[in-house]
């Protein structure tokens, strides 16, 4: 009868330890599942962040292309405008030089007329 009580107590202790072990394993499995879920959530956030960053890169690249095209177009327009201004300046300089030469010829003619008039005046 004493051996039966001892065997029963050992069996209860063994069952208790088995239950405690099962609870610990259950808790460890739950923590492991939480870590897996957390890792999945982080991976999902990373994927969203990566996709967002990729989309942002594409958007920036497109904006850069548009800005570059605009800059090239403006550069071409400025080159055309600069060439037109150079042509106007050349024409203006040419006109100024022509006017100056004409004025010098006119001054020379007037000087010659003045000299002749003075010569005629002296003769009288």
Image: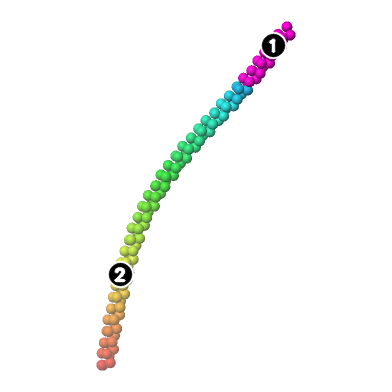
Pick whichever, 113 or 39, lies toward us. 39
Image coordinates for residue 27, horizontal then vertical, percent: 61, 24
In this rendering, the answer to whether 121 lies above or below 109 is below
Pick whichever, 36 or 95, lies toward us. 36
The residue shown at (29%, 75%) is 101
Q: Is residue 84 magenta?
A: no
Q: Give the CA separation, mark 2 to mark 1.
A: 126 Å
- Asked which quadrant contains residue 28, the reply is top right
The residue shown at (44%, 39%) is 55
Q: Which residue is mark 1?
A: 7
Q: Residue most toward the right?
A: 2
Q: Which residue is mark 2?
A: 94
Pick whichever, 16 or 99, lies toward us. 16
Q: Residue most toward the top?
A: 1
From which residue to which does the magenta span run? Answer: 1-23
At label 1, counting other C-alpha atoms closer than 10 Å, the crowd grade (few under 14, some 14-19, many 20 or more) is few
Element assignment for label 2: helix
Q: Earlier along the polypeptide chain: callout 2 or callout 1?
A: 1
At label 2, counting other C-alpha atoms closer than 10 Å, the crowd grade (few under 14, some 14-19, many 20 or more) is few
Instruction: Report whether 36 appears left or right of 24.
Output: left
In this rendering, the answer to whether 87 lies above or below 122 is above
The quadrant of the picture occupied by the N terminus is top right
Image coordinates for residue 37, horizontal then vertical, percent: 54, 28
In this rendering, the answer to whether 33 lies above or below 89 is above
């Amino acid at each position: 009868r004493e051996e039966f009580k001892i065997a029963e107590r050992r069996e209860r202790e063994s069952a208790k330890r088995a239950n405690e072990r099962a609870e610990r394993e259950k808790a460890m499995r739950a923590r492991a599942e939480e870590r897996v879920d957390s890792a999945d959530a982080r991976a999902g956030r990373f994927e969203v962040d990566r996709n967002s960053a990729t989309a942002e890169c594409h958007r920036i690249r497109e904006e850069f292309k548009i800005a570059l095209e605009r800059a090239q177009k403006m550069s071409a327009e400025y080159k055309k405008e600069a060439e037109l201004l150079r042509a106007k300046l050349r024409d203006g300089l040419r006109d100024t030089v022509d006017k100056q030469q004409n004025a010098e010829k006119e001054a020379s003619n007037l000087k010659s007329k003045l000299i002749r008039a003075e010569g005629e005046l002296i003769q009288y």
